[in-house]
Amino acid sequence: MITRLGRLAAVAALAGSLVLVSPMTAEAATGCSQAGSQASSQKYLDALVDRNAAWSIPLDPFVIRYENGLPTSVSAFDLKLQLYLHIQYSVFTSIENIVWTWQPDGRENVINATYDIPVGVGGLPLGSSTVVEDFTLNPDCTIKRIDATFTIEPPA
């Protein structure tokens, strides 16, 4: 009986947290705007170079990220933790030349960011990468999918 009540309490707590994570707004009824999509996506880009920005990214609880076609993150907690730990991102020195495209190829709820990331350690340039990244957003402007394609090139 106690075990059953414990499970019920855990399910209720999880359901309550999901409601708090994605509150309904007037924006949610009409979809995420271009400005809202760009603001949410920019928070993700900020976290690529600043680990402390990881916790402020508005993510769907079950966000999935693909990098060069491979799934590399399967939940909001997983993605935020990866960005916060900053292991593979610590060589990114900045994000440059961002070009935003709203609803590329007519895809609704998608914003594309194409940008350059210089890669280096201790002031020594190691290379750079041009990244093409599609963000698919929910009506409440939380990111539900990230598709990134990139290659690393040697320094010029």
Image (spheres, rainbow, N blue to C red):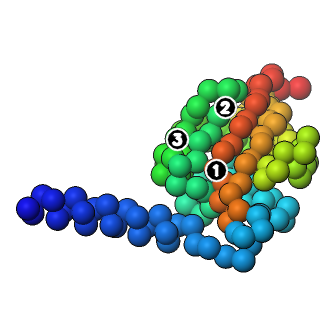
User: In 3D space, how far apart are the residues under numbered discs 3 and 2 (Cα atoms)?
Assistant: 12 Å
Secondary structure found at label 2: strand
The relative height of residue 59 versus residue 27 in the rendered view (above or below) is above
Residue beneath the point at 91% across and 40% down: 105
| Res 125 seen here | no
Q: Quadrant of the C terminus?
A: top right
Q: Quadrant of residue 107?
A: top right
The picture places residue 48, in percent across and down from the top left corner, at: 67, 47
What's the mark number on residue 46?
none
Q: Is residue 89 left or right of residue 12?
A: right
User: In 3D space, how far apart are the residues under numbered discs 2 and 1 (Cα atoms)?
Assistant: 15 Å
**In front: mark 3 or mark 2?**
3
The picture places residue 62, in percent across and down from the top left corner, at: 53, 49
Query: What residue type is disc 3 on?
Result: Val
Query: What residue type is disc 2 on?
Result: Glu
The picture places residue 95, in percent across and down from the top left corner, at: 79, 47
Q: Earlier in the sequence, mark 2 or mark 1?
A: 2
Q: Which residue lies under the disc numbered 3?
A: 74
Residue beneath the point at 57% across and 67% down: 22
Q: Residue furthest left?
A: 1
The picture places residue 103, in percent across and down from the top left corner, at: 87, 49
Secondary structure found at label 1: strand
What's the mark number on residue 144?
1
The relative height of residue 2 versus residue 24 in the rendered view (above or below) is above
Q: In the image shown, does 121 or 36 lie closer to the viewer?
A: 36
Q: Which residue lies under the disc numbered 2?
A: 67
